[in-house]
Amino acid sequence: MIECDGRQHYADEAGRADSGRYAEMVAEDRELRLRGYEVYRFGGAELTEGSATDKELAAFFDRLAERYSG
């Protein structure tokens, strides 16, 4: 499972850090892992920061493919 985390995962409507929201997110991660899923999280900024993003994502998916091919 691949997750892209934006502000809604860790902040309230005013943009302030919300430890309750964050706790809910990590609790869901644990539940998914206990059910046998692997969770790969990306922060929203990782996907919007320019040309390096394409290279980083390509490298991640190449490594993921290597892990499961063979």
Image (tube, grey):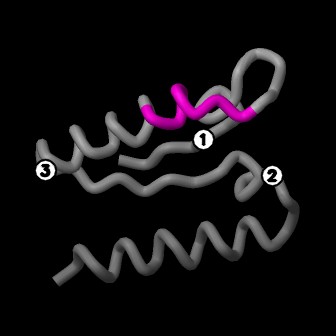
Count every numbered label the image shows and give the total.
3
**Is residue 36 placed above or below 12 in the rendered structure?**
below
Q: Which mark is residue 26?
A: none
Residue at position x 54%, y 27% in the image: 21
Kindly identify the amino acid type of the residue bearing the numbered disc 3.
Gly
Identify the residue under disc 3: 36
Q: Nearer the viewer, residue 6 or 52?
A: 6
Quarter of image, res 16:
top right
Residue 68 on the magenta span: no
Kindly identify the amino acid type of the residue bearing the numbered disc 2.
Thr
The residue sitting at the front extreme is 19
Identify the residue under disc 1: 5
Q: Which mark is residue 48?
A: 2
Whichever of labels 2 and 3 marks the residue nearer the N terminus, that label is: 3
- The percent coordinates of residue 4 (x first, y second) are 57, 43
Q: Which residues are magenta?
A: 17-23
